[in-house]
Image (cartoon, rainbow, N blue to C red):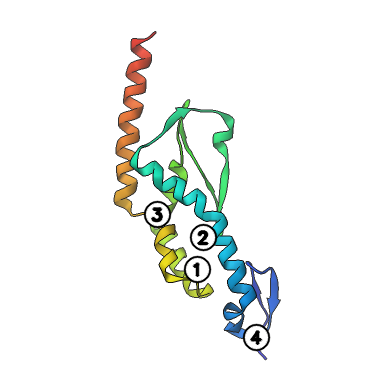
Amino acid sequence: MAPAQRCPLCRQTFFCGRGHVYSRKHQRQLKEALERLLPQVEAARKAIRAAQVERYVPEHERCCWCLCCGCEVREHLSHGNLTVLYGGLLEHLASPEHKKATNKFWWENKAEVQMKEKFLVTPQDYVRLCGSSVSFFKLLQISKKFFK
């Protein structure tokens, strides 16, 4: 008999070896979990094109759960009294650790291969966000000095 394994998506213990990941219940749970995370990832991807920098407010400390890595990730990046919206999530999505964990997650859960690219951000895209947010930070600092 196969040793007992626990599926974090279905929240159940199973004894059928790797057969569980092919079950309808597991595939349905996987699809629902990925669909819950997808809107946050898509919003973060939109932020790559035009970085949004806002004044820091306590709600910018919000975290989201990375299903692939199994860890909490800060959604926004804050520096002083300024916050880059979705900067923390994009930093995580561009990390090599996330890419490795995503590959492992997709392999273990037999998720749709076409969806995997939606949950990864290239380091070049993250650098583009950093470049636009840094220039935005500089503009804000100059405008603060000018309008004092």
- What is the crowding at mark 4: few (fewer than 14 residues within 10 Å), some, or many (at least 20)? few
Circles 2 and 1, Cβ within 8 Å, touching? The answer is yes
Mark 3 or mark 4: which comes first in sequence? Answer: 4
Marks 2 and 1 sit apart, C-alpha to C-alpha, by 8 Å
Nearest to the eye among marks 3 and 4: give it.
4
Circles 3 and 2, Cβ within 8 Å, touching? The answer is no
Q: Which mark is residue 95?
A: 3
**Which three-letter amino acid code belongs to the residue tagged 2?**
Cys
- What is the crowding at mark 2: few (fewer than 14 residues within 10 Å), some, or many (at least 20)? some
Q: Is residue 82 left or right of residue 3?
A: left
Which residue is labeled 1 in the image? 105
**Which three-letter amino acid code belongs to the residue tagged 1?**
Phe
Mark 1 or mark 3: which comes first in sequence? Answer: 3
**Which three-letter amino acid code belongs to the residue tagged 4?**
Cys
Marks 3 and 4 sit apart, C-alpha to C-alpha, by 34 Å
Indicate the quadrant containing the C terminus: top left, top right, bottom left or bottom right: top left
Q: Which mark is residue 69?
A: 2
Circles 4 and 2, Cβ within 8 Å, touching? The answer is no
Q: Circle 4 — which element?
A: loop
Q: Circle 1 — which element?
A: helix
The image position of residue 33, as x and y in percent, is 58, 61
Marks 1 and 3 sit apart, C-alpha to C-alpha, by 15 Å
Q: Is residue 86 left or right of residue 5?
A: left
Judge whether residue 87 can be spotted in this image: yes
Q: Circle 2 — which element?
A: loop
Q: Circle 3 — which element?
A: loop
Mark 4 or mark 2: which comes first in sequence? Answer: 4
Which residue is labeled 4 in the image? 16
